[in-house]
Image (spheres, helix red, strand yellow):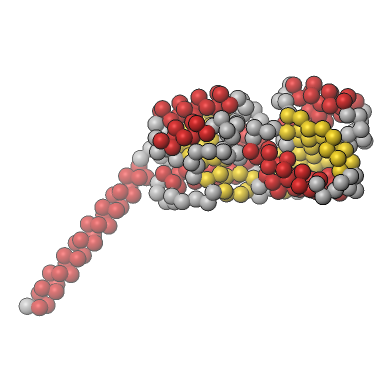
Amino acid sequence: MLMRRTKKTLVGIFIGITLITLSALGWAGEVQAKEFRVGMALKIKDNPFFISLTEGAQNEASKHANLDLTIVYAEEKAMIQMGQVESFVAAGVDALIISAVDTKALISPIELANKANIPVFCVDTGVEGGKIETLIASDNHLAGLLGGIYMVKRLNGKGNVVLIEWPTSQSCRERIEGVEAVLSIYPDMKIIHREMGKLPPETTTLAENILTAFPDVDIIYTVADIFTVEFYRVIKMTGKQDEIFLVSVDATPEAKKLMKESDCYGASVAQQPFLMGELSVRCAMQYLTGEKTSFPDFVPVAVKLITKENVEE
């Protein structure tokens, strides 16, 4: 009698476990089958860094049959990006990936996404408010430090520096902070001027004005190669390639080409935008499928100083 009851009990337990397992598998299948819509709002389209980041995002998206990824570009205009993010929220996307044009202006749209329970992931540049799941970006402070160290070594700790900034971007501010941290140790490294950059074609006029106003400049540091390439062209036109050198960030194909052409284009710190694009989409999908619901505040992506010596590597 006891054996018969035991068998019945075991059969009941087995059936119960089987039903729970099948139910769980069915739920997992539903998650996999569900189509997720992710909106991605990037700063600018025709920029080598964001072209590569876009390609990385699309590459990762291609691995997920149930993902509909929509990418929009604000052309460095905060008001446009605010409207784009608000439109994504109104459309009820499942997640947002944002590279903020302006770290303060984007707070309000992100808070709107928070209220709608839409998870927000930042890539390249974060924001100063609202809730985000994580920021996937280069270690931009380190990028600035590497550039600053190169500048000091090349000038033996003495020279005049002009900084070309982009203060609305968190990543660019961190690069400048890194440079300043190095230069502050060397009293003979003088920052004689600093100015907000202007995008091409206006960069050319900016470069001409600075070279005219500061004929004693030794180094021009810009926060991105999109500015530096234009500065190089103006310096070359004025025949000052042997008097001034440039340091920047991104190490774009054009920057690498100019490094090989002249010592004037001294160095640029390489980022990994393709990987950043991949990781941003991967994190969003991990969150949406329940594979991972907690992320570190910051996911750093490695950077590397590129000069003529290692440009071919």
Residue 127 x, y percent position in the rendering: 56, 38
Residue 145 x, y percent position in the rendering: 75, 48
* 274 relative to 41, above or below: below
**What residue lies at 53% left-to-right and 38% top-to-bottom?**
129
Task: Identify which residue, 20 or 98, lies in the foreground.
Answer: 98
**What residue lies at 85% left-to-right and 48% top-to-bottom?**
186
* 77 relative to 175, above or below: above
Image quarter where the N terminus lies is bottom left
Residue 87 visible, this angle: yes
* The quadrant where residue 256 appears: top right
Residue 291 x, y percent position in the rendering: 42, 51
Task: Identify which residue, 247 or 233, lies in the foreground.
Answer: 247
* The quadrant where residue 33 appears: top left
**What residue lies at 54% left-to-right and 32% top-to-bottom?**
106
**What residue lies at 10% left-to-right and 73% top-to-bottom?**
5
Query: Residue at the bottom extreme?
Result: 2
**In the rendered view, does 282 fall on the left or right side of 308?**
left
Residue 264 visible, this angle: no
**In the rendered view, does 33 fall on the left or right side of 87?**
left
Query: Residue at the left extreme?
Result: 1
Residue 40 x, y percent position in the rendering: 51, 34
